[in-house]
Image (spheres, rainbow, N blue to C red):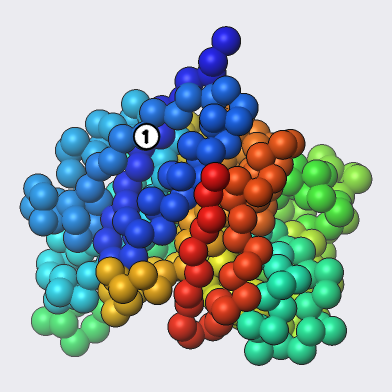
Amino acid sequence: MVKQYSIAVLPGDGIGPEVIAQAERALEAAGERFAIEFTLRRFPIGAAGVAAAGDPFPEETRAAVARADAVLLGAVGDPSLDQAPRHLRPEFGLLALRAQLGVYANLRPVAVFPALVDRSPLKADRLEGVDVLIVRELTGGLYYGEPRGREDGGASAVNTLRYSVVEIQRVARVAFESARQRRGHVTSVDKANVLEVSQLWRETVTRVGRDYPDVRLDHLYVDTAAMRLVADPRAFDLLLTENTFGDILSDEAAVLVGSLGLLPSASLGDGPGLFEPIHGSAPDIAGRDLANPIGAIATVAMLRHAGNGIARRRVDRRGTAVAGVGSAIDVSHAKSVGPVKRYAKAHHA
């Protein structure tokens, strides 16, 4: 019996449609090999949503996302809307998408491709064996806290960093469960020496950790973690952190592999998951056949994390289909990928 899954595809802006087209081909190749039928339907988001419906997260897209088994996102962002009101900016659509899906745990694996080790500015001997999973809380913290806004006629501004015990507990459990499938080591990142919110974070993660005696837990201040991530990346198995710190550290981790274009991500909650490469829309190279699709193809591989088991084990973390597909999705030739100019194509059967 053929399994059927519905994927809402949101190509987005800039290079998003280009890389997502290759990711769709990878998904279809795996589906053909393993008798899985993926229904892929495209909907606008970001600047494309504004152009189509005057909304970075149009109602049609909202409805499609609610019905889907999973959501595949390209990238959002367009400099022409940088000065637009907040509700019309592409990033507002992304935040609204995350909020609707309730995806509170973002998983970002960082593993170095042996063929691309010379693309990183770090020495090769520092990169051998690097395999880090960053688990980032995604729906709380500074990006969502209230009150927020400009005050005194624009002369001052405020953002609120707020977390509850429940928010911390649920993402911590995702981290500890994930660590059990890895090397059993969680490093929780905070700034507990100066932030009360971080003190609550550390206390809560410690309590959750007691339910996982088989997982080793330690804590690092975010500045120390940032330094060690480039000085000794092999020391980390899984990094657990709040929203803002996770945003920064996961982008820093791209230095290890040489480019943001190589990193995938999965955002999980209680409903459909959100799967996206972590790079931006790169409007300066859009339409020029320069965009590297490896991150988008590897994102398809992360559908194995979807709660309903979509494509579980069908595509490995490096974007190569396993269990018989093999050469159908070959990105190993992409040695020319660099930290600035990114050029690669995916070969498909």
Say which residue label 1 marks: 40
- Look at the picture and state if 243 lies above or below 166: below
Q: Quadrant of residue 310?
A: top right
46 to the left or right of 229? left
Q: What residue is drawn where x is 86% and y is 52%? A: 184
Of residue 247 and residue 294, the one placed in the foreground of this image is 294
**Residue at 38% of width from left, 51% of height from top?**
21
Query: In this orientation, does residue 159 appear?
Result: no
Tell me what residue is drawn at x 82 percent, y 40 percent: 211
Helix, strand, or loop for circle 1?
A: strand
Q: Residue at x 31, y 73 (%)?
A: 288
Q: Residue furthest right?
A: 214
Left or right: 34, with 74 as reference point = right
Please say whether residue 215 is visible from this viewpoint.
yes
The quarter of the rendered structure image containing the N terminus is top right
Amino acid carrying mark 1 in the image: Leu
Q: Residue 112: percent from the left, percent from the top?
A: 71, 69
